Amino acid sequence: MDKKSILYLSHCGSSIGGGEKQLAYLVTNINHDHYQPLVVCPDDGVFAEHLRHLNIPTVILNLPPWRKAKSLIARYNAADKLVSLAKKRKVQLVHTSDSWFNPYLWYLGKRLKIPTVSHVRNLLTPKQVRKYKFDRMDSVIAISQQSKTPLTEARIDTRKIDVILNCVDLSVFQPLPVTAQSETYIVGIVGRIEPFKRQKVFVEIAAKVAAQCKKVRFHIIGAALDTPEHRAYAQDVRQLVVKHQLQAVVHFAGHRTDMPNAMQELDLLVTLSAGSVIAEAMAAGKPVIGTPIGSTTDMIVHGITGYVIPLASIDAIVNQIIELANDPTRSLAMGQQARRHAEEAFSVEAHVQKVQDIYEKLLSKG
């Protein structure tokens, strides 16, 4: 049987975020007897190197922003290079891990008459759905019901849309054996330090908790990108810690390459922006407190594996952290439930099979 060549467009090659982790899970676990993945990254770096280490064919090709006027000539040059690459590798389907690349997907699909799959990992507006040519895609994968909503509001054919939750490697992210309870209770937030992740709000939550419960410690896991905006935000986060005199209870862990160990160090994950960290924490046997944004409500079973609390209700988040810190037996039990739920809902194998089913449906048409 000839392998079907699938071309993937990655958001970046220079760093590893949630989207890159999910793409790596897919291309390394897809049925390699049937499919040959090829990943195109717009820049080089740790993610591209990670893919090469996994023996995934990887090409670096700059993809300028499609809609910017200054990119008019460069975007078509890049798109034509994509077409040439796809022809050379006999690509039969193209899948973008970042929906901002939809125009390139559309161009490739139109020129080569091959099916296109767009993965929606961001919270879009109906206007953005229309702007980024989702109506021209053959299939759209949303990572949550909430990310599906603007697609349907923009009148994208619901037959094209599948909701497939993020996955996690359950063999890598595992709970630690139960031991004697520690005197401290560690609450973490994980992700790139940036406004969208809301680490400043996390520090405000930490200040309120610390004023009422002395046993809680806080880990901020992640680093800022080397841009003026991100550096300024990271500095604001650190200044806020100093303002609230939290230097003794807030630990900046920086970027961690050993995320399974980082998760095991926590007693509780707080996420204010959703993402694959929810699956990772639950696989590691940790309860999760999140806000109703993105995939959070699809992934957390409220009151069983954690809590979904509106961001506006900071005091409710604070009270829930204190309750769990003061009742470690309950926190541990929720973590055990979280692991069981992760095994049922977030396995890599089930995730990949659902994507492969979409591929087979599209390829069987042509």
Image (cartoon, rainbow, N blue to C red):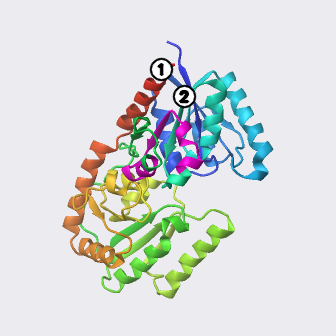
Is 139 in the magenta? yes
Q: Amino acid at mark 1?
A: Lys
Q: Is residue 357 above or below residue 301?
A: above
Farthest top residue?
1
Which residue is denoted by mark 2 in the rendering? 115
Residue in the image at 37% along x and 58% along y: 264
Q: Is residue 17 visible?
A: no
**Residue 138 appears at what percent x and percent y?**
51, 32
Q: CA distance from mark 1 to mark 2?
A: 9 Å
Q: Which mark is residue 365?
A: 1
Residue 53 position (above or below residue 230): above
The residue nearer to you, when weighing 313 against 166, is: 313
Position of residue 131 measured from the top left corner of the image (x, y, whole percent): 59, 49
Could you say where residue 23 lies in the image, as x and y percent from the top left? 51, 41
Amino acid type shown at disc 2: Pro
Q: Secondary structure at mark 2?
A: loop
Per the rendered image, the range of residues in magenta is 129-151
Crowd tier of the residue under label 1, counting other residues whose Cα lies within 10 Å: few below 14, some 14–19, many 20 or above = few
SS type, badge 1: helix
- 131, 221: nearer the viewer: 131
N-terminal-most mark, 1 or 2 = 2
Extreme front residue here? 155
Q: Is residue 5 magenta?
A: no
Q: Residues within 10 Å of mark 2 (few under 14, many from 20)?
A: many
User: For this view, does 298 lie left or right of residue 218?
Assistant: left
